[in-house]
Image (spheres, rainbow, N blue to C red):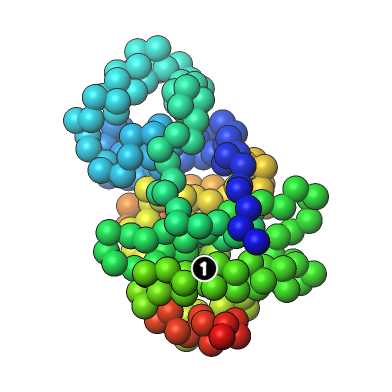
Amino acid sequence: MMRVVKSRPVFTKELFDLQFLFANRVCALSGMAPERALLRYTNFYVRLGLGRAFDLEHPGWQSYITGLNDTGAADPGAWTYRCYLQNAEANTAPPSAATFGCFSYAISDAGVVRLHFRNTETDGDSSLGADRADQRRAELAALFGHLRQSRHAALPVVGVSWLYNLDAYRRLFPAAYVQSARVVPDALRSMSLWGQFVDRHGRIKESMTQPFLASLERQTSREGLNECFPFQVLTVRAPAPAFYDFYGLP
């Protein structure tokens, strides 16, 4: 059964502080101007509700940078977080065609079905735990049953996330889909990458951030910064019939 998902959780200030540390390291290693590092190496542009054009001259971005250089100079993380809360999670997610539990799908302009995951569990247990695997598969079966009845039934299915590194996530999908995985080389502006540091409540996972920060401090070149992330973003792809067969859809 399709059900409506509540609005996305508001992230905590620590997520923005973490990205500031990363952007500052970029500046230190490359000499890049801070406003460009924040645009190219953080998820701020999207989180501030400015879309995905990543336009340095966007009035909203310029207003944010001006305030950062003035009001926010003493505590840039606090300034950024205040700007975020003014429009928290507005215009940050693409419109979905349907949502089933933790999963939703959208039809992209590229002519593919884009699969999305969001933890909607409310009891504190892991949404990807072994005891929830059957529930997650049932949600996916319902989702692909919905897709199969739509005019987009023949489109290929694509996923992009750090989650495809996890056995607990991969086991929910057809082998042809997960075996197609390849690394997305430039995902530093996406929550598909930064999401690995955030728990279901929007709080930072210390177990993930501490190794990340230690590795970040050791880097001596900008080219090595991607290696600091515990997981890279993977993209996967398979034809829709692979899913219909896998979930036993008639």
Residue 215, compared with residue 173, is above or below; it is: above
Residue lying at 54% horizontally and 73% vertically, measured from the top left? 145
Figure quadrant of residue 226: bottom left
Figure quadrant of residue 22: top left
Residue 229 in sight in this render: no
Q: Amino acid at mark 1?
A: His
Figure quadrant of residue 111: bottom left
Name the one closer to the observer, 211 or 190.
Answer: 190
Where is residue 118? Give x, y as percent. 58, 54
Name the one closer to the observer, 169 or 210.
Answer: 169
Callout 1 secondary element: helix
Residue lying at 33% horizontally and 52% vertically, measured from the top left? 222
Name the one closer to the observer, 9 or 153.
Answer: 153
**Which residue lies under the disc numbered 1?**
146
Q: Is residue 126 left or right of residue 230?
A: right
Residue 98, compared with residue 80, is above or below; it is: below
Q: Quadrant of the N terminus?
A: bottom right
Residue 176 in sight in this render: yes
Where is residue 78? Give x, y as percent. 51, 22
Where is residue 93? Give x, y as percent. 44, 46
Residue lying at 60% horizontally and 69% vertically, measured from the top left? 142
User: Mark 1, residues whose alpha carbon is within 10 Å: few (<14), some, or many (≥20)?
Assistant: some
Residue 133, compared with residue 52, is above or below; it is: below
